[in-house]
Amino acid sequence: MAKRHVLFVTIATAVFSLAASLSAAAQAVDMQCINEVLADADDSTTVGELRTLCRERLSDESTAPAKTQVPVYEQSALAERLAYEEGAEDRPFSITMHQPSYIMWSTVDEPNVAPFLPLDPTAQLDDSEMVFQFSVKAPIWRNMFGSDIDGYFGYTTKSYWQLFNDDFSAPFRETNYQPELFVRKVIKRDRSGLGILGWDLSLNHESNGRAEPLSRSWNRVMGRAGIQLTDNLTMFARAWWRIPEDDVDDNNPGMYRYYGYGDVRAVWTPNRNTFTAMLRPGTQETSYEVTWSYPISRVFRVYALYYNGYGESLIDYNYKNERFGIGIALNDFLGRQ
């Protein structure tokens, strides 16, 4: 146990050191300042001149008397994210974040060892493991057929790494791969407008890439909507239909009992904190998740998660667990800097 604690402290120290060094590099040139200077510049202004103007502005601000004030946001958190992504994706070679990307240490109440026993009756799982998720998307067809609908490719991978399980060579317990093709429409609204700000329609595949008896996969047609309730409160609603499989080929029998037909997630961004709460009602079982994140630099956020229910991963689709984790994230569903 002491060895695990030393290893965890070493990993945490390395992660926070990396965050600090990247924070210093990110703050060398303030991109928000550059965007503000760019808005007033003419076509002949060079990139070097923009950086010089921005450094001068930051220098002036650093010598001004300190003021204590609450940040004023000029649009809702959801509209802010959609506008930022729209601008970023107009550039060549653009890739933006999709679902949250993070790495965290976590612990579960009781690991699900049952799927592995047919292959190794002596298999044991540690209740502590590293969990990391990486999720990106890229536009593949802007303004489809001359409309205001865009086509995207998205990819998400989530891994559960038994880093502290020395007896079994620290294996990756489970990895889920989720590619998808989707179309997106962003609905333009002014700051006071409430309602749906965007929707997606996707063809979604998810699997763990393993052979029987550990193989898990399913294909879905999925609809998503981002609903602005207030400037700081957003709801993301998803509904899906699983593409049927033959009983012989179905390695996830009874999925609707645990996954149901959709989920809802509320995201609250009252300030630089981001709080989320997810509810996924199955036809017989219900799962929920709550998270919190806060920016520690212009690159990273501290990220904490609590999960209770079924289907956190495909290998656990019919197994209930309770997980708590804390780590570092590149992004959240929404977030203020």
Image (cartoon, grey):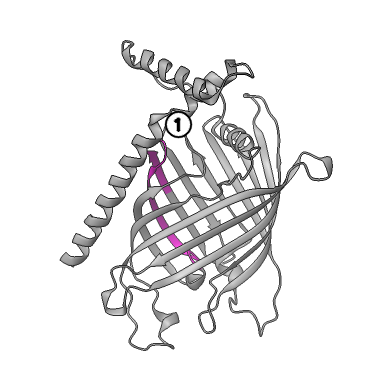
Which quarter of the picture shows residue 64?
top left
Instruction: Name the residue at 51% across, 41% down.
Output: 267
Expressed as whole percent of the image width and height from the top left, the position of residue 299 reads 42, 40
Q: What residue type is labelled 1?
A: Pro
Instruction: Evaluate whether residue 296 shows in this view.
Output: no
Instruction: Name the residue at 38% across, 67% down.
Output: 161
Of all residues, the one furthest to the top in this rendering is 65
The residue segment tinted magenta is: 291-313
Give the main secondary structure of the magenta stretch. Answer: strand
Q: Is mark 1 on a helix, strand or loop?
A: loop
Instruction: Evaluate whether residue 329 shows in this view.
Output: yes
Instruction: Name the residue at 58% across, 46% down.
Output: 95
Between 254 and 60, the one nearer to me in the picture? 60
- Is-magenta flag for residue 185? no
Q: Which residue was labeled with disc 1?
A: 270
Instruction: Name the residue at 34% across, 83% down.
Output: 123
Q: Alpha-carbon neighbours of circle 1 within 10 Å: few (<14), some, or many (≥20)?
A: some
Q: In this view, does 220 lie to the left or right of 21?
A: right
Between 298 and 58, the one nearer to me in the picture? 58
**Quadrant where the N terminus lies?**
bottom left
Expressed as whole percent of the image width and height from the top left, the position of residue 79 reads 60, 32
Expressed as whole percent of the image width and height from the top left, the position of residue 155 reads 58, 57
